[in-house]
Amino acid sequence: MSIKIMNAVWHLSRQKGTPLLLLIAIADNANDNGEAWPGIEYLARKIRMSERQTQRLVRDLEKTDELIMERGGGRGNAHRYFILVGKPSEEIADLKAREKKGDKMSPFPGRKPAHPPRALKGDKMSPFPEGAKKRVCKAHKG
C-alpha cells in the first residue's frame, strides 16, 4: 500500500461515487509508482459490487487519464493496473501511447518484473544434468 498514491487519488482524482471507490481500492494495493495487481474478484468484494460491474467500472476508468490496465492474458494471470493520478500530462500521454501500441514493458523505467520468467520445457533447469545418475535411497529401490 502506498500512502503517496492513496493521497494523490483522494486529493486529485476527478472521480466520484463508485468509480472513486474502485480507484481507491486499486490504490490501496499500489506501490509508490502507482502499479498494482489486485484481481477483479478481490476488487469486487472490496467495493461491494458484482465482478461484472467492477469490470465495467475498470473499463470506464480506463477512458479517463486516471487508470491504465494491462491485461494479464488469461485465467490466473493478474491484470496490472497503473494509477495515473498526479502524474504529469507528458508522462500520461507517453504511457497511453505505449499501451495503445501494445508495449507490455513496465512504464516505470528501471523496474524489474514482479515475477521471474517461468521455466520452459527443455530449458535445462533440472538439478540433474542429462545422463547423470540420480541417487536413490536403498529403502526405496525396487
Image (cartoon, rainbow, N blue to C red):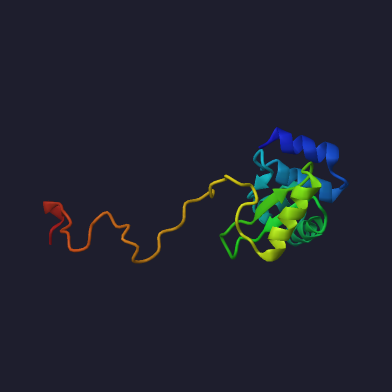
**Where residue 61 sits: x, y (%)?**
80, 55
**Nearest the camera: 77 or 93?**
93
Residue 75 relative to residue 140: left or right: right
- In this view, the residue farthest toward the front is 90
Query: How many numbered marks appear?
Result: 0
Q: Is residue 28 above or below residue 117?
A: above
**Nearest the camera: 84 or 30?**
84
Residue 133 relative to residue 69: left or right: left
Res. 65 visible in picture:
yes
Q: Is residue 73 above or below residue 4?
A: below
* Position of the N terminus by quadrant: top right
**Where residue 84 sits: x, y (%)?**
76, 47
**Nearest the camera: 102 or 37?**
102
Q: Residue at x 64, y 40 (%)?
A: 31
Res. 48 visible in picture:
no
**Where residue 114 sits: x, y (%)?**
54, 48
**Residue 58 sits in which quadrant?**
bottom right
Q: Residue at x 23, y 56 (%)?
A: 128
**Where residue 107 sits: x, y (%)?**
65, 51
